[in-house]
Amino acid sequence: MRTVSRSTSEPIALPAGILTDVLCPIFHRFRRRLLLGLTALLASDVLYLTLPRYLKIGVDELAQGIATRQRLLVLACGILLTAVVTGLLRYVWRTLLIGFSRHLETALRDRLISHVLSMDQTFFDRRPLGEIMAHASNDLSAVQLSFGLGLAAAADVAVMSVAAVLFMLHISPPLTLLAALPLPLLAVCSWFLSHELHRRFEQVQSQFGLLTEFARNTLVSIRLIKSCTREEQQMREFGQLGQDYVASNIRAAMIQGLLLPLALLTGSFGTLLVLHSGGTMVISQVISIGEFVAFITYFAMLAMPLATVGWATGLIRRGMTSLARICRLLTATSTVKASLHETAQPVIRQSRPHISLRRLSFSYPGTITPALSDMNVEIGPGILGISGRTGSGKSTLCRLLVRQYPVADGSYLFAGHDVNQIDPALIWRHVSWVDRNTSLFSASAAENISLAKPDAPLAEIMEAARLAAVHDEIMAMPDGYQTRLGEKGIRLSGGQKQRIAIARALLADRPILIIDDALSALDAETAQQVFAALRDRQRGKTLLLVSHHVQLLAHADHILLLDQGRIAEQGSHAQLMARSTYYQETASRQQGKEESGAQLRLF
């Protein structure tokens, strides 16, 4: 059961303005750390490049026969002291710069999660959760390595290369130009290879997202997979995705593996030229033997950074690819947002806000058939029942009321204001929604119930649980209200999950409560008990009940019957029983089932 699609191979470019919008604030925040780290890096490299000067002096004095033990001891102490200070400075800059990369990772992760939490349902409909998880794990790790080891290596290469070339030019400009002959070839090859590396790293990261999404889907649906004996099939498909991921990594490694040998080959060719031409210059007494030894040492120091160019390029390229993927996510905008600035937001003055739907129509993104058409509804204090066949638009209406999807201007008024002029968070603070597909966290029962009111005392939590008819079952658990419910409440039955969600909504105590078929997993007696508690708690407030149970709908002040996204019938229970064939048949069918169940219980 393949639940993910193949990745594309198109590389992702950094969105325009990303350096200003995302990275610059982070760099500015840690500017002192970066400045100190770069200063320590510059100082350590300059000190390190003074070592060949000691060698030049010592070799020249030995060649001239004027060296003494004391003089050589002084030079040795100078080399030792320089090496110690250089090592300390290297420790400082590596700690500061690599530590900065961890701060960068944290800042990007916080911004990523904050952005994802602000998105509407359309955003999640378009993106697999595994892809988002890959951004928050593998991509962020690649960015951290790029701006940690990658940035440090790049800065080290730049400083060492420039300083080494300057020292080499001081000794012999012609020999320096000769040694630099192979470098343009290295630069051109590295540019072409890094471009291809970017494309292949995008494939790697995309494939990792597919792998993560497949693993997530497998774990979430583990009971279904086992009940359908799909374990072997899942393993085969997961294994194929793993092989594709490995193949993508190998294709990237093939390009990355060319960079280091290319740099070493360039350095070796340069060394060959230096040995031949430099030796000739020594014989001709153009330079001294000490200068020749110092030049060779500087060139070796230059060759070391060149040898790391391939590794650093791969690291930075991978980080830039991941950063582009993260930034593409950060540039996504929510389709549900207020069109007015925060300072111009209208004030909700009603303690029990009224909802008006005016010719509301809606189609899910990517579909043509409307899910809702021309809805005209007034929702105020009292109980509004909603029923209809499967797929008639009941849950869609609930999702629009809680602002999961965008609506046309003027089609949804909340407390007299167009919802497109109101911050969605302001509406969420007035509305509680209990879906039939209950969401629970792997936390304690008390924490799940108090999600919307985390500071609620245990007594209030227990009272809400009693109203939802789940208190006794929680107390029967090993640790009572401190019992952890497991991932998505796996330890609970469907009815227990729904009642805990209802207890959560009751504890939130908001003026509008939407129950979207969240009593479906309860038996008739328990459903009646819970509904009675909901009715009493919401007295004077708004209760919107989506249900197929006519016994519950009978208590509603007004009932809407939906059919294919439209209001087919509406009225009180008595009115619908008198004129709606669908409602009559539903009531008759449910009454027959109850009578059959009562007869069976007699036996």
Image: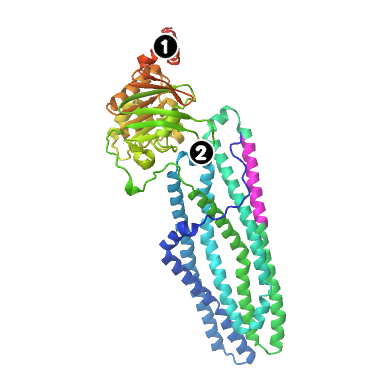
> Pointer 1: what residue?
591
Assess whether residue 330 is covered by the magenta stretch.
no
Position in image of residue 523 (x %, y %): 41, 19
Q: Which x, y percent locates residue 176?
A: 64, 79
Image: magenta residue range: 234-254
Say which quarter of the image contains residue 321: bottom right
- Residue drawn at the location 66% of the way across and 70% of the way down: 184
Q: 95 or 398, which is in the foreground? A: 398
Based on the displayed image, in which of its 4 quarters is residue 229 positioned? top right
Mark closer to the chain start, 2 or 1: 2
Where is 24 relative to 423, above or below?
below
Quadrant holding the N terminus: top right
Which percent across, then down, holds residue 150? 55, 62
Magenta stretch holds residue 239: yes
Q: Which mark is residue 373?
A: none
Crowdedness near tag 1: few (<14), some (14–19) or many (≥20) residues, C-alpha within 10 Å = some
